[in-house]
């Protein structure tokens, strides 16, 4: 009588081992494919931000303003340009089909905040988040210790469990001073102590257009900026607009795990004014900080100061940068420091 054929135990184990080996060989390719898709999505989001900026330009004739400082945040009742204390992400909402987030009668001075402002500050539009880094949701602010976020108005925002963050930053050039609050030895840009103080006295807004001042700004979006097309002297296709910002992986979810300087590039909100959370720069020869702190890097490979100064991303080998003409290109982490600087500065006469 013929015996039925079947796999032996040894044969079964060999087959399982071969399948496991094939899966191990396949996984890097699958992961690379997924990362390529995420990088493409990230580049597409930067492109959408650039398109929204073109619409902003058509309407207001200048690039979105950087706002006032971290002490002030987006205010739906204060328009655009120099009058708007919030940063560039807020100014783009109307041009990203998110005008409903701007439409509220709530006032920042109200405590508790009205539902319209709560919705705005926790909205977390997916276009603000790189899919290779973190999901689109509200994340905690820095609540205690070094770098605790404080506000001149809207104290109710500080009580929210999480706020909108952003993984993209506007180009502030190679400015030596590049945040709305004094840091160490650098001078301060003036901001009013309150809205009431602004209305009751002559504003002392800082001059950022003097090349001989340490406050001189050479980028596209910065403190109370209104940069017109003609002021991008090096050419729209040769000047950065927005790019991915560097962030250490351990700070993706909650910046409260540290009191070091590294958390200061993500300790506030996308809706803050001119701050490291939503603006980055290239290296300036006159700065006191190491060059490496300004070099674009993959997350986790830069210095602590990279978290507040540098462009960068979660992608391997290169990051996405948009330019003032609306194009989006990949920029290698190995880019020459001066080439990177020249593309950040809108008017240095250096064209690459």
Image (tube, helix red, strand yellow):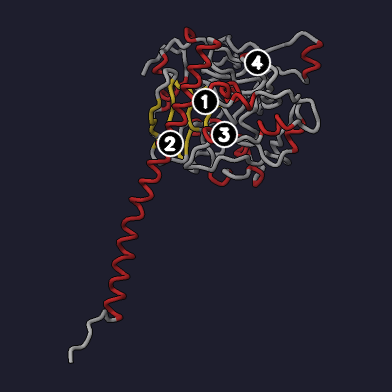
Specify which label sits upstream in the sequence, 2 or 1: 2
Specify which label sits upstream in the sequence, 2 or 3: 2
Which x, y percent locates residue 9?
30, 81
Q: Do the numbered discs 2 and 1 sit on residues whose CB atoms are within 8 Å?
A: no
Specify which label sits upstream in the sequence, 3 or 1: 3
Q: Is residue 300 above or below residue 226?
A: below
Q: Judge by depth and name the residue closer to the eye, 272 or 122.
A: 122
Disc number placed over residue 79 in the picture, else none = 4
Where on the picture, by quarter, is residue 43?
top left
Q: Which residue is mark 2?
A: 41
User: The residue tagged with tag 4: helix, strand or loop?
Assistant: loop
Q: Which residue is mark 3?
A: 125
Residue ranking furthest to the left: 1
User: The residue tagged with tag 2: helix, strand or loop?
Assistant: helix
Q: Do the numbered discs 1 and 4 sit on residues whose CB atoms are within 8 Å?
A: no
Where on the picture, by quarter, is residue 185?
top right
Question: Is residue 40 in sight in this rendering?
Answer: yes
Q: Which residue is mark 1?
A: 281
**How many labels, in total?**
4
Alpha carbon distance from label 3 to label 1: 24 Å
Alpha carbon distance from label 2 to label 3: 14 Å
């Amino acid at each position: 009588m013929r015996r039925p054929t079947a796999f032996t135990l040894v044969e079964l184990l060999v087959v399982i081992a071969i399948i496991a080996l094939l899966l191990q060989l396949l996984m890097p390719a699958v992961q690379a494919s997924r990362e390529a898709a995420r990088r493409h999505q990230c580049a597409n989001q930067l492109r959408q931000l650039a398109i929204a900026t073109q619409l902003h330009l058509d309407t207001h004739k200048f690039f979105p303003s950087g706002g006032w400082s971290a002490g002030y945040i987006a205010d739906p009742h204060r328009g655009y340009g120099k009058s708007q204390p919030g940063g560039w992400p807020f100014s783009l909402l109307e041009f990203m089909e998110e005008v409903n987030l701007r439409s509220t009668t709530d006032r920042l001075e109200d405590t508790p905040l009205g539902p319209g402002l709560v919705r705005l500050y926790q909205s977390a539009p997916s276009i603000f988040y790189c899919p290779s880094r973190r999901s689109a949701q509200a994340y905690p602010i820095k609540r205690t210790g070094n770098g605790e976020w404080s506000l001149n108005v809207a104290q109710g925002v500080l009580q929210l469990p999480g706020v909108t963050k952003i993984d993209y930053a506007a180009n502030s050039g190679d400015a030596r001073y590049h945040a709305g609050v004094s840091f160490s030895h650098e001078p301060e840009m003036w901001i009013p102590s309150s809205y009431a103080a602004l209305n009751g006295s002559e504003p002392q807004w800082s001059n950022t257009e003097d090349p001989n001042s340490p406050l001189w700004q050479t980028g596209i979006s910065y403190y109370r900026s209104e940069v017109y097309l003609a002021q991008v002297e090096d050419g729209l296709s040769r000047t950065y607009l927005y790019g991915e910002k560097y962030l250490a992986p351990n700070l993706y979810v909650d910046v409260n795990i540290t009191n070091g300087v590294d958390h200061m590039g993500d300790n506030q909100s996308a809706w803050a004014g001119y701050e490291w959370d939503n603006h980055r720069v290239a290296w300036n020869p006159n700065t006191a900080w190491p060059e490496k702190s300004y070099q674009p890097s993959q997350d986790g490979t830069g210095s602590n100061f990279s978290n507040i100064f540098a462009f960068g991303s979660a992608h391997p080998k290169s990051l996405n940068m948009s330019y003032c003409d609306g194009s989006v290109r990949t920029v290698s982490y190995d880019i020459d420091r001066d080439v990177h600087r020249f593309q950040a500065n809108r008017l240095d006469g250096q064209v690459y």
